Amino acid sequence: MKSKEDVQTIIRRTPISRAFNIAHTSTANTTVGRAYALVLILSGAACILMTQKVYHALPFILGIGMMVIGTTHTICGLWAKEYQSKETKLTANGIVYVALGLVILAHHADADSVISSIWGVLGLMKGSEALNGALFHASRKEPFAALGIQAIIELALGFLLLIDPSAVQHHVLLLGLELVAVGWQTLRESKQSEQEESHQTADGKGVIRESF
């Protein structure tokens, strides 16, 4: 189990756009990363195949989900004291997500307008971060398709929801596509982490053998 100092090191080295995904930044959590990716992909499939059912339960799903995620990240951020570094914002994001979850639950009867406003702004912010990541990977000639798709979907949803609040129902379908894309990206990162860990282990064994 990683110490508090290890967690702080991970957070400091994690770019702002990836701070929200701290749960799978460590190679020791490859299994967790794969499970997280599977949950995202299955959730995306549910949004695509059962759009109407998900839409009717959306205020409660989204409100409770944001509160759980926000609470988890706030506790993690406070425990690791990541707020002492200007390069990360896990604690701040967690507090904001808890507040947004409460707002959605409090206005569940008229959730479309509230959700469209919140999701619209968050969509543009996340889309901008995903686009930045895609451009970064593209400049280094690394795979960037998943991040590119995520950026396009996030930006499209953000603009659509701000312009037309009634588009929340369509957002559920597009959200499903986004979750599948993010799940694919997360799964790919988990595999890369596992490969890097295997290479490091192999190199370490080689060094030990050479020393004898």
Image (cartoon, rainbow, N blue to C red):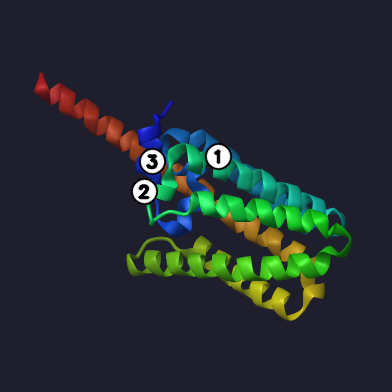
Residue at 62% over, 43% down: 71
Residue 52 found in image quarter: bottom right
Q: Which of the pair 112/31 is nearer the observer?
A: 112
Residue position for label 2: 12
Q: Can residue 203 be seen in the rendering of this structure?
A: yes
Q: Which of marks 2 and 1 is nearer the N terminus?
A: 2
Q: Could you give the CA–CA distance between mark 3 and mark 2, rounded to whole angstroms?
A: 6 Å
Image quadrant containing the N terminus: top left
Residue 4 found in image quarter: top left
User: Which three-letter amino acid code belongs to the residue tagged 1?
Assistant: Ile
Which residue is situated farthest in the top direction here? 212
| Image spot of residue 14 (x, y percent) | 39, 51
Residue position for label 1: 75
171 vs 12: above or below: below
74 vs 153: above or below: above
Q: Could you give the CA–CA distance between mark 1 and mark 3, rounded to whole angstroms?
A: 13 Å
Residue position for label 3: 8
Residue at 71% over, 70% down: 117
Residue at 78% over, 74% down: 165
Q: Could you give the CA–CA distance between mark 2 and mark 1, rounded to whole angstroms?
A: 17 Å
